[in-house]
Image: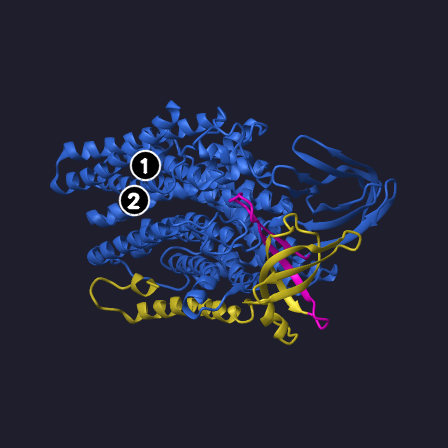
Amino acid sequence: MIAVTVGQWALWIALAIAVYGMIASILGARQRVPELVQSGRNAVIAVAALAVVSSGCLLYLLLARNFQVDYVYQHVSTYLSVPYVISAFYAGQEGSLLLWLLFLAVAGAIAVSHRRDWNEDLLPYVGAVVSGVAAFFLFLLVTFSSPFKLLPANPGQGIGLNPLLENPGMIYHPPTLFIGYAVYTIPFAYAIAALATGRVGSGWVRGIRLWSLFAWLFLGIGILLGAQWAYVELGWGGYWAWDPVENSSLIPWLVGTAFLHSVMVQERRGMFKRWNVLLATLTFALCVFATFVTRSGLIESVHAFQRSPLGYYFLAFLFIVLAVTVALGIWRRQELASKREMESFLSREFSLLVTVLGMVGIGLAVLLGTLYPALAQALSGRDLSVGPAFYSRVFTPLGAAVILIIAICPLLAWGRSSPQRVLRAMLWPGVMAIVFGVALALAGIRPLYAVLGFAACVFVFTSVLVEFGRGWFARKRMTGESYPVAFVRLVNKNHRRYGGYLVHLAIVILAAGVIGSSVYKTSTTISMRPGESMQVQGYSLKYAEYAIQPTEAKQRFAVTLDVSKGNRSLGRLTAEKNFHWNIEQWVTEVAIRPGLVEDLYVILSGLETNGLATLEVQTHPMVTWLWIGGGLLFVGTLWAMWPRSEKKRAAGRAE
Amino acid sequence: MTENKTNVPAQKRRSAKQVKFLAGGAVVVLIIAYLVFSSMQGATAAYLTVKEVKAASPTERLVRVSGTVIGDTIEWDAHNVVLRFELADDTGRLPVVYKGVRPDMLRDGATATAEGKMGPDGTFQATQILLKCPSKYEEKATEQATSR
């Protein structure tokens, strides 16, 4: 039981140190006492070390299956396999908060250890903000939400993980998302530091570029991993159901996207300073809000945790975050003013402003839809819910507009650009989009808005490729290098630009996947006896075998089909519907045959003892495109983040 | 929204040019706001009690009704994929029919929310069923089923 004591005490000591660290950092910076500043920095590192110790203790208790610890009893059983025992760390509220703290503290320790000339004045305040946020989570962990609470006696067996959570998604999705949430603390901390010191120039936005890309990447990939999980889990309504918990993870990503773009304007033109401070804070606040939605039970969701008083503390914390930023912003309003004015609608600045407004607008719309039921309940006492219809009506036109901006924005120059040049650059993408759209329409693809959507995707895709090609051929002409060499050197010369282009391509692929999968889904219900064959949506399904057997954890019901299309065999699919003893509940395991064009998705809805099976056979077109787009998003963002070697950077400066 | 502050120079002087960009930004904001508020119309479903649902005449409008599932009344026709059950709240009992796969968590005592319309035969035609599990499981303890 030493692990319980150590883990609990580590949290208490960390709380004391975090509070001290916050005060020491601020005092040290304001009174110019280097010793206090250093001490505040050490405090951030100490909190990180203690968070690691405490997390290690919880992990040890889980792996040792010490059921006297309530948290272990709730989430682990003797027959749960080790990967899921590890994932039980964040299966409950207490462990999730500890994980948040762990990522936040480690990121904070790295941030304050990264001392450079440009951030010497900012770092004490960064440390203070990190300590303050850590103190909030530590306060929750030692008071309302301790993972180290003990039961009076050891029950000998735990309840175990909900079988719905026994999916690889459980291992990858929550930590990825949490890294994104927690790391967004660093850009926020820098924004506050910039306001506190009055150094709101381009230093801080340049300094946090890697942090914000890193957090954005993890958040994005986390959302996609969650979508993938929801897709294979029958009860969660497909990869995206506009559920409040899903929405609340998307909102900070949308606002974070706006932030990534508005930062560029400050770096290049010294404008948008207010936007950047606001967006850094908003993104962080929305990450906290997302954690809060999952914890509070305030909003009806299929993924929510039980209702708890934690919600009020989260609300209070959010209020403080926003109030501090607004107060500091008003105090520094002189410094935040732009030194330069916009010159033209046809400029990179203005198109980026539209991008920012669009992303924040979509984010706020989703937020409104998510909060509307709670607001309506509070204001008028009426209970109501907002359906997916709202989101698709808002998202479709705004999404299309944002996608088109992706095509236009990179073509525009800073300051102003000539309309002729822009029109010329849009010629080939326009031709391709029209040809493609007409071809689709002639091929009988309907409805029209889907055709338009695909044509828009082609327009953007081509325009990004044309931009690639333009740079590539120009380099080849100028340097006389061979095509492959010119290509590699080109993309290597400007990681930011070409990484960004790759991400733009990824977004277009994602958009195409979303259009295809939401418009062309089919569903057919069939009944079959063993040995029978059937044709469904062009697939021939042969009922190969079935199994009804009890195991230690469940009563298993399974049907295996041989699937083929034309003469080509596509292998076997086994769809299951199992009754789990420990929760006395049915859990359906769908069978999926993924494909580039469409996924075949089979649900077993009933199996009688004589083998008569009822199956729901669905086709989900272009879902695979989402995962491909996600992969490309990952590669592109990594490329944009990849540092150039010092030598090359020096050479680049000399050029 | 602070976009109208973004381009204002420190000196209170606003050139005519800047007003143009502010207007441009404002147009974008107004379009988004219009979309959001117009889309909200008809996209919300009101929660009603069983009594209210029964009293309401059949309309095109979606409503939601919550209650406890009565275990004895669950009829699952796996052949035709039709689920029938009754929901009960303080105001009465409501027969519900749902054409779709039986949600795993549907059982006696579970709290269910059905979204749909009242049919002419006095049966609630659900297009979506949401379930909250009464067990000790906290996470993911609810489930959603949507007829596809």
Residue A342 pos. (x, y %):
33, 62
Compared across the picture, whether A117 is left or right of B139 comes to: left
Q: Secondary structure at mark 2?
A: helix
Residue at image location 39% in from the left, 66% down from the top: B25
Q: Amino acid at mark 2?
A: Ala
Q: Is residue B126 above or below residue A48?
A: below
Amino acid type assigned to the residue bearing label 1 in the image: Gly
Report the coloring of the rendering: by chain
Q: Nearer the viewer, residue A254 or A433?
A: A254
- Side of A494 where A20 appears, left or right: left
- Residue picked out by circle 2: A189
The image shows a total of numbered marks equal to 2
In this rendered view, identify the residue nearer to me: A606 or A370. Answer: A606
The answer to which of marks 1 and 2 sits earlier in the sequence is 1
The reply to whether dot 1 and dot 2 touch (C-beta < 8 Å) is yes
Q: Which residue is mark 1?
A: A108
Q: Colour of chain B?
A: yellow
Q: Chain of mark 2?
A: A
For the C terminus of chain A, give its image quadrant. Answer: top left
Left or right of residue A290, residue A330 in this image = left
Indicate the secondary structure of the residue bearing disc 1.
helix
Q: Quadrant of residue A359?
A: bottom left
Q: Is residue A241 left or right of residue A471?
A: right
| Residue lying at 53% horizontally and 63% vertically, measured from the top left | A386
Which chain is painted in blue? Answer: A
Check residue A396 for magenta coloring.
no
Q: Residue at x 88, y 43 (%)?
A: A532
